[in-house]
Amino acid sequence: MKIKIKVKPNSGKQEIIKKDNFYLIKLKSPPENNKANIELLKLLKKYFGKEVRIKRGFTSKNKIVEIN
């Protein structure tokens, strides 16, 4: 399953908000040295309980994530 995600780094808290056709995810980590992507993957793995990987948008706030 693939989902669309919009990431907001440096938010001060972790939060997952389900919108109409995408997820808005707030992260504590800054978007430097891949820290926000690592936090995103850990948070999504905990949320869905499955393996997660970024398919598109490694350096963008808008991402496509695949959940296995």
Image: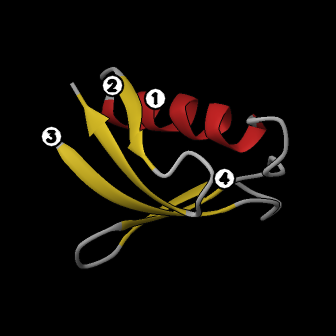
Q: Nearer the viewer, mark 2 or mark 3?
A: 3
Rendered image quadrant of residue 60:
bottom right
Q: CA distance from mark 2 to mark 4?
A: 17 Å
- Asked which colour scheme the image uses, the reply is secondary structure
Amino acid found under the numbered disc labelled 4: Gln
Q: Position of residue 31 (x, y in %)?
A: 78, 51
Mark 3 neighbour class, 10 Å CA radius: few under 14, some 14 to 19, many 20 or more: few
| Residue depicted at 66% across the width and 52% down the height | 14
Cβ–Cβ under 8 Å for marks 1 and 3: no
Identify residue for label 1. 46
Q: Nearer the viewer, residue 55 or 3?
A: 55
Q: CA distance from mark 2 to mark 1?
A: 5 Å
Q: Quick check: 33 left or right of 24?
A: right
Cβ–Cβ under 8 Å for marks 2 and 1: yes
Whichever of callouts 3 and 4 sits on the residue coming sooner in the sequence is 3
Q: CA distance from mark 4 to mark 1?
A: 12 Å
Cβ–Cβ under 8 Å for marks 2 and 4: no
Q: Nearer the viewer, mark 1 or mark 3?
A: 3
Mark 4 neighbour class, 10 Å CA radius: few under 14, some 14 to 19, many 20 or more: some
Rendered image quadrant of residue 12:
bottom right
| Residue depicted at 45% across the width and 29% down the height | 46
Q: Quick check: 59 left or right of 9?
A: left
Q: Nearer the viewer, mark 3 or mark 4?
A: 3
Q: Nearer the viewer, residue 14 or 40?
A: 40
Amino acid found under the numbered disc labelled 2: Gly
Q: Position of residue 5 (x, y in %)?
A: 41, 60
| Residue depicted at 26% across the width and 33% down the height | 67
Res 49 label: 2
